[in-house]
Image: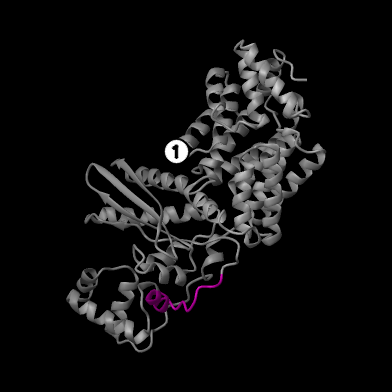
Amino acid sequence: MNHDAASIPAALSARQPVPALSERERAVAERFAAGLTYREIGEALFIAPSTVRTHLAAIYEKLGVRSKVALAMHINAVTAMPTVPDTSPVLAIFPIECLSADEQWRRFARGLSSDITIDLARYADLPVIAFHTMKALGSKPADFTADGKALGAAYLLSGQLRADTQRVRLTMELADARTGVSLWSERFDRPVEDIFALQDSLTESVINVLAGCFGAIATVGRNAILRKPPASLRAYDCYLLGVEQHNTFSRSGNREAIRLFSRALELDPTLVKAWTELAYAYSIEACNGFGDNLSASIAKWRWAAENALRLDPSDSTAHNCFGDLMGCLGDLEAAERAHRRAFEYGSNHADTLALLAGSKALVAGDPAEAIPLIERAMRLNPLAPPWYFGMQGRVLFTAGRHREAIAALRRSTPDSPHVLIFLMLAHATLGEAREAAAIADRLRSEFPSFSVEGFISGYPVSNPGAARAIREAAKLVPLC
């Protein structure tokens, strides 16, 4: 899905002459709207910075505008931003301000701004205004209320870059577009190295701290939603609350997640991420034995995953979910194809990498590839939610690193039978029969329909080595 198309005009029309401006005023207006400073405009037009200021005062008066955003809309012949469907807030990313005089770092800041915008549009679960629109507005909002209203944005992201021969420092800030109140800020320091590797590293860090199921944007959104009356919830609100419930991996949490995702899709049937998360919720229902009918859960899993991919064929998590489904249906070649597409579209997205690691370990492909995937996910997302550790635990168990698996699983969701089964199996393999038996008793008590073979068929565990390791360990502490 092209998020830009939802939040900005399909294309900026050809530049139109702005009435009432002289040729010199038009030249000043175009350069100022493109983000040049008074000094840079003066140097380009061979006039003093004070003359630039005088021209701009006259331009603002003639056009009846009060901000650089409004001026840019006139210059680009954009009369109004279209109304965004009432499903999710819009994010506007201002070009990163370079505080270093070296032109190399100015080019670097422009490239970094573009990369962050493109990747956030792919991963942040909300519409992002296109970079070619934002670069005309300069590097910082002049008036938060006016800029946010003109852009139709709820959140404004801005940044500053400082660099010397040794180090680069990038500061990013997320603000409420209505009030200008800072919602989140972070500083990223890197040693100067290969310029393209440095740009990729900074982009990845910013994306994975901001985006993802427990990233800064989702956390800010959930905190705001919790203050709303239930009757006022929009599709995006229901989606965010559903993700929070889904990630408990408990029976009650998963049931509530399905209800919230279904409600989100009633309000907006085109909300791709809600379809993807609904598919994952039905997969959890299937492999944990949370539903009454395994075949029905798998059929709903397929229905939701196919709808997500129909709406957005580049959604990496939807491809990963569909790959797991194909494994569950016994088509391992289709599973591997889907997982390859997931990596292709989400190679820099920590959530996708963590999910893919679990799939590589248990479903299809080479389990040896799972460990570097989960390690990269952890590096990219220092705010890793508990379910990352659940994925890490099953990957480490499959690799035979049982003590490390236990340490990871202890940091995961405590009420998930997925976590409990691998804790039980790891303790059993290490000869810790008492610990394994206690977990087996809990599984029998709290999840009476859950079984090792049911987990293997429902997850699915279709990698032969992983299935063999689980079955061998299960013999040491029979679950049912």
Instruction: Identify which residue, 188 or 78, lies in the foreground.
Output: 188
Residue 197, x across and y down, in percent: 37, 42
Residue 450 is inside the magenta segment: no
Instruction: Identify which residue, 44 or 291, lies in the foreground.
Output: 291
Magenta stretch in the rendered image: 70-83
Quarter residue 340 falls in: top right
Type of amino acid under label 1 = Pro
Residue 320, x across and y down, in percent: 63, 41
Residue 73 is inside the magenta segment: yes
**In percent of the image, x 69 and y 36: which residue is there?**
333
Q: Is residue 452 left or right of residue 354?
A: right
Q: Please say if 372 is above or below 50.
A: above
Q: Which residue is mark 1?
A: 382
Q: Please say if 468 is above or below 328.
A: above
Quarter residue 387 falls in: top right
Residue 12, x across and y down, in percent: 47, 73
Q: Please say if 169 is above or below 107.
A: above
**In percent of the image, x 61 and y 16: which residue is there?**
427
Q: Is residue 56 left or right of residue 217?
A: left
**In percent of the image, x 52 and y 56: which residue is there?**
224
